[in-house]
Image: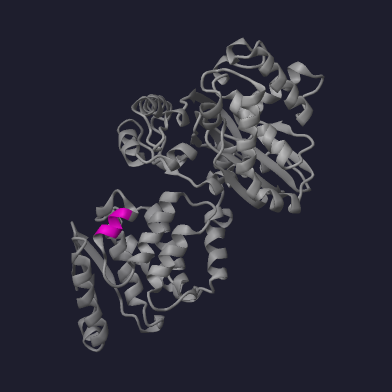
Amino acid sequence: MRDYPSIAAVDLGSNSFHLVVAREVDGRLQLLHKEKQRVYLAAGLDDDFNLSDEAITRALDTLAQFATTLHEFPKESVQVVATYTLRNCKNLNYFLAKAKQVFPYPINVISGQEEARLIYQGVANHEHDTHNRLVIDIGGGSTELVIGQHLTHKLLSSRNVGCVTMNKTYFADGKLSAKRFKKAEIKAEQHIESITASYLKLGWNTVIGTSGTIKAIAAMVSELTPDDEITLTKLEQIKQVFVDAEHIDKVTLKSLPEERKVSIAGGLAVLIALFRQLNIECMRFSEYALREGLLFEMHQTEEFDIRTRTINTFCDHYNVDKQHADNICETIKLFASQLKTSWSVSSYDLEMLCWAAKLHEVGLAINSSGMHKHGAYIVRHSQLPGFTQTQQSRLSALIRFYRKKIKVAELSELVEDEVDQFSRLLAVFRLSVLVNQKRQQDQLPELNLSAVDNTLTLHIASDWLESHSLFQADLEQEQQYLKTVNIQLTF
């Protein structure tokens, strides 16, 4: 009997936290379990973008509940992403430290562009369309807009305007009026205005809305009109119902859930602004979004891994010496296998090191002088589909310090946590680059790397070393560099 292991996706949104468990059966995903908890994270941001203790407590309670559901799930089978509120809050590190105490899985904070891409993948892998389509997701703190065809996105955008933040600004006391809606809509249109021309120029045939805000609005449309197709006229009709009620608690629409009332007016204003600014004629709702996009990518093979494709595209764009990068990767794999036990080098660590090897020379496109600094900047600030902000930060740190002096203060700033383990990986990366620096693979001797605690020993034939005095000098210099991160190199 075949075994079908389960995988899980967790979405830490600005309004709600979601957990989805699924399994892959013969190439198809079967959804097994769903959980949703309203956390209202965005409502807990103060004017300085610090997350309140109350919001953090709500989030931790939900994470503890999710941890119970995911008990005994291996880490590689769970993907956790955090969106607008956590990527913008100033006390993120404090929150993540607290979260580790109740939730054993890594929380990946993703960019708005990455969020938009995953939302599109969630729709695209469940709904077929041969023409351009516009996918819109109004979240608690941001709104994502994507134009794509089939499985490929063409335009991605994330705007910092969402249902919770808009509600907090214009409808916090629950009062509803035409004047308040007008102000909210104008503000939302200002957020959208800068992307309008490019989106209209590319165009689309169909418009799809996803997630909770648009789902609630679609339900109200169905209650008030004969069909569930969303149009501007129907949105204005819902708005008039709200204005006539004068307060959100007096809105009597049966399709509006009680828990959605705290943010729906803000979400409605954003959707009206989108329809006006982008000249949208009609929209339909889709059940699929970010979580399904995460699940889809979790069961992809390496050949179809979006990160692999991203790295390859990046290498092509910057004319990377692929043979040299591959040679470094082979050395990394050799060293990683030798240190797997003593330094706990995981398959994920190996992936990160090989990605860094492929990208470490992209800075040459700017200047060979200081290319490690240029490369680190490019990787940190580019859009890398499939990569989280943490992963980009770590790739950037590996590239920034793969050669020359290691500045511990900068390293700590880039990596933020687990600096000791990262320093070990950096040592492996630096040595792998060093032994391949002449780009002559046939001249390399047999190499063996071993470690005891933070002492790293490179075993190499003494007669070869004596005949390569420059390499020996480089190793002696590397000894001094690695001391700054408490790694003792011997050879």
| Relative height, residue 346 to residue 140 (above, below) | below
Is residue 477 in view from this perspective?
Answer: yes
Q: Position of residue 438 (x, y in %)?
A: 37, 83
Image quadrant holding the C terminus, namely: bottom left
Residue beneath the point at 52% across and 19% down: 173
Name which quarter of the figure residue 99 lies in: top left
Compare residues 15 and 300 and report the one nearer the observer.
15
Residue drawn at point x = 42 percent, y = 69 percent:
374
Residue 23 belongs to the span the image colors magenta: no
Q: Residue at x 24, y 89 (%)?
A: 467
Spot occupied by residue 91 in the image (x, y as percentages of width and height): 34, 39
Q: Quadrant of residue 425?
A: bottom left
- According to the image, what is the colour scheme of the structure? one colour
Majority secondary structure in the magenta region: helix
Vertical side of 478 occupied by 217: above or below: above
Quick check: can you spot residue 27? no
Query: Magenta residues, as a range?
Result: 409-413
Q: Quadrant of the N terminus?
A: top right
461, above or below 197, in the image: below
Provide residue 108's location: percent of width, then percent of height: 43, 43
Find residue 28 and report its horizontal and vertical position in percent: 63, 39
Residue at the farthest front position: 179
